Amino acid sequence: MSVLGRSGNGRGCNRCSPGTGAANSPQANSLANGVESPFCCSSWRKSAHGERPKPSTHTRSMQLYYHPFSSYSQKALIAFDEYALPFEPRILDTPDGPAMQELAALWPMKRFPVLVDGDHVILEASCIVEHIGLRMPPAERLIPPDPALALEVRMLDRVFDNYVSTPQQKVVFDALRPAAERDAAGVADARRMLETAYAWLDVRMAGRTWAVGERFSLADCAAAPFLFYAHWTHPIPQAHAHLLAYRRRLLQRPSFARAVEGARPFRPYFPLGVPDED
């Protein structure tokens, strides 16, 4: 079995914490047990967010190891939904449950999501999105066939990962620590990074519908959950009207709206509280 994957910054980026990169705390995972995944191959049905696209006719089974409340898992789930590709959900419901034990055997870091596709194990959410796109016609992929646009999509994917998700998770992880072990200086740095990222993204999104070009892409798969949780963690200022409007468009995208609904039962475990608007 081969292992495929890369990290844009030399580290594993699918981190585990409620409402951050994933959720492998005993509290959050206990709630996941028995929750039907809205992305299961048996669940292609009409929802409050519209009719699902018909499932792809590809028959080779894929297994996805993930948690519904994980932002990095949601990034992959959005892509599966956009492509209407079925998969077998392996929900990581408890720290020592069967799915987590399988994940540890596949990837000792135990970071997720992880995809098993036949003899291949694909690590990292961005790589999963790119991998499953190979099943689709080039014009329908979330990474465009034009090389220049594809490079820009991958660049924005890295921006949302490194400068939105990473500092957001720093703040949340710190809130989960005992008070005596908290890193006030590190949290302040993370909040400043978020503010800088918000300002840059607000300028970029002026006059744009999606992050790159005219079509929804991998960059938007990243932006959707990362901006969603970042706004919970360090609110986007009202002055950044373009960025806030982009976040609203992402929430209206059926693929992400379904991911948000699938994660709703786990909201009580977000340590900073959930804003009423979401």
Image: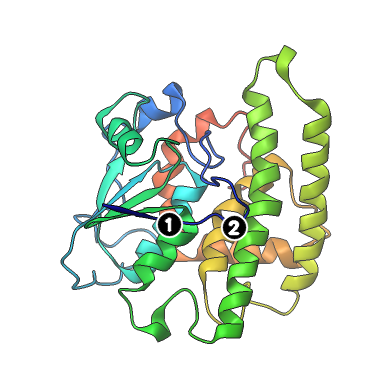
Residue lying at 68% horizontally and 36% vertically, measured from the top left: 170
Q: Position of residue 254 (x, y in %)?
A: 43, 64
- Marks 1,2: beta carbons within 8 A: no
> Could you say which is closer to the camera, residue 144 or residue 224?
144
Q: Is residue 195 left or right of residue 269?
A: right
Looking at the rendering, which quadrant does residue 111 occupy? top left
Look at label 2 and name its amino acid: Gly
Q: Residue sitting at 61 percent across and 37 percent down? A: 274
Give the x, y percent position of residue 252.
52, 64
Considering every residue shown, the one lying at the far left of the view is: 59
Looking at the rendered image, the disc whose residue lies closer to the viewer, 1 or 2, is: 2
Residue 50 can be seen, yes or no = no
For the question of whether residue 116 can be seen, the reply is: yes
Q: Say which of 40 and 132 sits in front.
A: 132
Q: Is residue 29 left or right of residue 168?
A: left
Provide the secondary structure element on which disc 2 rests: loop
Query: In the image, is residue 50 above or below residue 213?
Result: above
Find disc 1 in the rendering and name its residue. 76
The dot on residue 129 is none
Q: Is residue 185 above or below residue 238?
A: above
Q: Residue placed at 63% from the left, 60% from the top?
A: 158
Quadrant of the rendered structure where residue 7 is?
Answer: bottom right
Count of marks, rendered view: 2
Q: Residue 112: x, y in percent?
A: 43, 43
Q: Which residue is mark 2?
A: 8
Give the class, few, some or many, for how many residues have Cα within 10 Å of label 1's Cα (few <14, many ≥20).
many
Q: Is residue 77 above or below residue 97?
A: below
What is the three-letter code of the residue carrying label 1? Answer: Ala
Q: Earlier in the sequence, mark 1 or mark 2?
A: 2
Q: Is residue 141 left or right of residue 212?
A: left
Q: Residue furthest front?
A: 2
